[in-house]
Amino acid sequence: DTVKIFLRNNMFPFDAIDSVKTYLSNSGNAIVNFDNASNGSYFIQVIHRNAMETWSSSANAFSKGTVLNYDFTTTQSQAFGNNQVLNLSRWCAFSGDVNNDGTIDASDLSTIENDVSVSNSGYIKTDLNGDDFADGSDVSVAENNVTGSVNVIRP
């Protein structure tokens, strides 16, 4: 799957300095190059097609030409506002924001249910578990997050 990763200024209004669209490995890792950012401290923002937008918990030092490692999966506190959910042994972005409006709510659930009712399949936003089908398991994930009132949390 793909994600868009932004480096954002560490002060309001948190302007986007650089971005990369990249594929995630099967283990959820990505290696990217930010060619337009200069040395500084930046928040990392991750946007996925059907998951909650997630920000790093704090700004991270970035030096052009060096490696910046950041692992959202190790602890909940790696995300700003602890805005992640534990799935097996990894902390993950919440799934279900299929309209990317910053909240997982009835409108997302309705969209998923509509795709389930017509047996929609393929690389679709409503396939929350990545099995190429909109089905009851996707509805279940979204229902859990609707009940939890999941919203984007930004600096």
Image (cartoon, grey):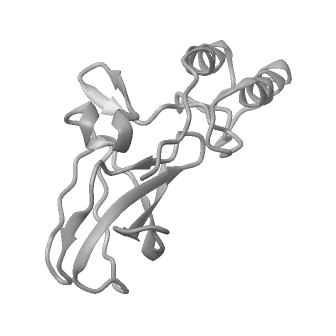
* Figure check: 63 above or below 121: below
User: Which sits in the foreground, 44 or 128?
Assistant: 44
Q: Position of residue 108 (x, y in %)?
A: 72, 30
Q: Position of residue 63 (x, y in %)?
A: 17, 79
* Figure check: 113 above or below 77: above
| Residue drawn 45% across the image and 72% down it | 19
**Quarter residue 131 falls in:** top right
| Residue drawn 29% across the image and 19% down it | 88
**Quarter residue 91 falls in:** top left
Q: Position of residue 52 (x, y in %)?
A: 53, 40
User: Which sits in the foreground, 50 or 10?
Assistant: 10
* Figure check: 42 above or below 124: below
* Figure check: 109 above or below 100: above
Extreme residue toward the left, this view? 66
| Residue drawn 75% across the image and 23% down it | 106
- In the rendered structure, the answer to whether residue 124 lies left or right of residue 70 reads right
| Residue drawn 85% across the image and 24% down it | 118
Q: Position of residue 78 (x, y in %)?
A: 26, 42
**Quarter residue 132 falls in:** top right
